[in-house]
Image (tube, helix red, strand yellow):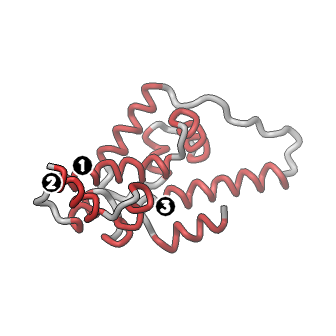
Amino acid sequence: MRAALRTELKTNSGGCHIYAQTMGNALAVHLLSRYSTRTKPFKPFTGGLSPRDLKHVVEFIGDNLNQELNLADLANTVQLSQYHFAHAFKQSMGISPHQYVIQRRITRAMLLLKQATISIHAISRACGFSSPSHFSKSFRKRAGLSPSQFRRGYFHKI
């Protein structure tokens, strides 16, 4: 966990604030559950987001992919604490909010890369990445190709 957090913060890839906040919350819960003087044990969170809340947060993410998204903003859209939101979101979607945001950004980038008139730099900004190099690293990691290779492959098929 520590190594993954360090890597995410060093690369400053899109969505790293969500990941850092989630890991910070997980650490706080771990410390509280292990070292608290509370006599009642903490109940594990069960359940996910309601369909209405899930739809609302997914729309919020889609509408704001070009901006820096953080866990507090996402949690506020459904009026939950960051900790409960992160767990409920993962139960509902099967992946963490951080992974979901990155997945949505890469999916949007793939659609934009199919338009030859938009530069890769503009696509990286439109998808909320901090720089074209961070966009390229994240894209390659998830798509297996660089953005320019993806674009060339798409237009070569046409």
Kindly report which numbered mark, 2 or 3, lies closer to the viewer in this rendering: 2
Q: What residue do we see at 33% from left, 48% from top?
A: 107
Nearer the observer, 23 or 146:
146
In the drawing, does residue 114 fall left or right of residue 89? left
Say which amino acid is labelled 1.
Answer: Leu
Circle number at residue 17: 3
Nearer the observer, 96 or 57:
96
Residue that badge 1 annotates: 111
Q: What residue do we see at 67% from left, 53% from top?
A: 26
User: Based on the displayed image, in which of its 4 quarters is residue 4 positioned?
Assistant: bottom right
| Element marked by disc 3 | helix
Kindly report which numbered mark, 1 or 3, lies closer to the viewer in this rendering: 1
Say which amino acid is labelled 3.
Answer: His
Answer with mark 2 or mark 3, whichever residue precedes in sequence: 3
In the drawing, does residue 55 fall left or right of residue 99? left
Residue that badge 2 annotates: 115
Nearer the observer, 57 or 77:
57
Q: What residue do we see at 56% from left, 47% from top?
A: 82
Do the CB atoms of the residues marked 2 and 1 lie less than 8 Å apart?
yes
- Mark 2, other Cα within 10 Å: few <14 / some 14–19 / many ≥20: few
Say which amino acid is labelled 2.
Answer: Gln
Cα distance between the residues tagged 2 and 3: 29 Å
| Element marked by disc 1 | helix
